[in-house]
Image: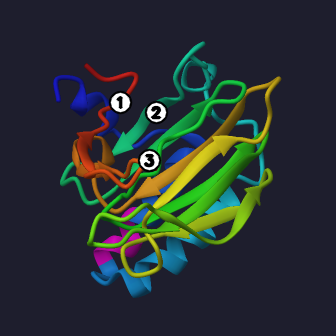
Amino acid sequence: MENRPQFAVVPSGPLGDFVRQVTSAINEHSSEELVLPQVASFMKTLVQNDNWLSEEFCKPHPEYYQQYLLYADPDDRFSVVSFVWGPGQATPIHDHTVWGVIGMLRGSEYAQAYDVALDGTQPKPKGETQQLQPGDVECVSPTLGDVHKVWNAFNDRVSVSVHAYGANIGKVSRQVYPVDGSAPKTFISGYSNVN
C-alpha cells in the first residue's frame, strides 16, 4: 500500500490509547481466545464517547458504505477502521476469515449472522438480528461465527462504527455469499481512503 506508513503511525488521543492496548495484548498473547475478550473490552471504552474520530473518517458516500483505515499494524497483525453507513446502506452477506470487534460509535446498525453450507445451498439466517446502539460491542471470528450482513438501522441519517480486525483487513481475501446460493465470490475490500 502506497500510503501505508501514514497509517502505521500510532495516532494520538483515545484511538492511540486503543492501538497501544491492542498492540500490547497481541504482543503478550498469540491466541484469539485470549486476545479477543481484551480487544472487546478496549473497544467498549473507545466507543463510550463520540468526540475523538476526525470528520475525514466519518464522510458518507451517496451510494456505498465507506471503510476508512485508521491504523494498520506495521506487521499486519491488526487494523482499525471506521465504517460509515449512509442512509439505508448495507453490506452483502460476507465473511472476514479473522477475528473482528465492532464498536458502535454513532447512529445504529443491524447485523444478521448466517450459516453457509459447503454444498452451495442458500445462506440461512442464524439467530436473531442484532441491533447495535452507541457504546455496544460485538465480536466475529471463524470460531464464533464469521458470516453476516450488516446495514444502517436508519433510512434518514448516517451511522458510524469502529472495527478492529486480526489482520490488515483491507488486504485479506474474503468471500461474499449470494442470497441465491450461487458460488461465493472472492473479494479484497481495500479502503476508501487508501489508493
Three-letter amino acid code at disc 1? Answer: Tyr
Q: Is residue 134 left or right of residue 190?
A: right
Three-letter amino acid code at disc 3? Answer: Val
Q: Name the residue beneath numbered marker 2.
A: 67
Q: Is residue 172 left or right of residue 122?
A: left
The structure residue drawn at horizontal position 25% and vertical position 52%, both measured from the top left corner, is 183
**Disc 3 secondary structure class:** strand
Q: Which residues are magenta?
A: 23-27
Which is nearer the N-term, disc 2 or disc 1?
A: 2
Estimate the x, y position of residue 2 in percent, counting from the top left. 16, 23
Q: Name the residue beneath numbered marker 1.
A: 191
Three-letter amino acid code at disc 2? Answer: Gln
| Mark 3 closeness class: few <14, some 14–19, many ≥20 residues within 10 Å | many
Q: Name the residue beneath numbered marker 3.
A: 80
Which is nearer the N-term, disc 1 or disc 3?
A: 3
Q: CA distance from mark 2 to mark 3?
A: 10 Å
The structure residue drawn at horizontal position 35% and vertical position 72%, both measured from the top left corner, is 117
Does residue 47 lie above or below 37 as drawn?
Answer: above
Quarter of the image containing the C terminus?
Answer: top left
Residue 151: quadrant of the picture? top right
**Could one spot residue 73 in this view of the protein?**
no
Q: Is residue 65 left or right of residue 177?
A: right
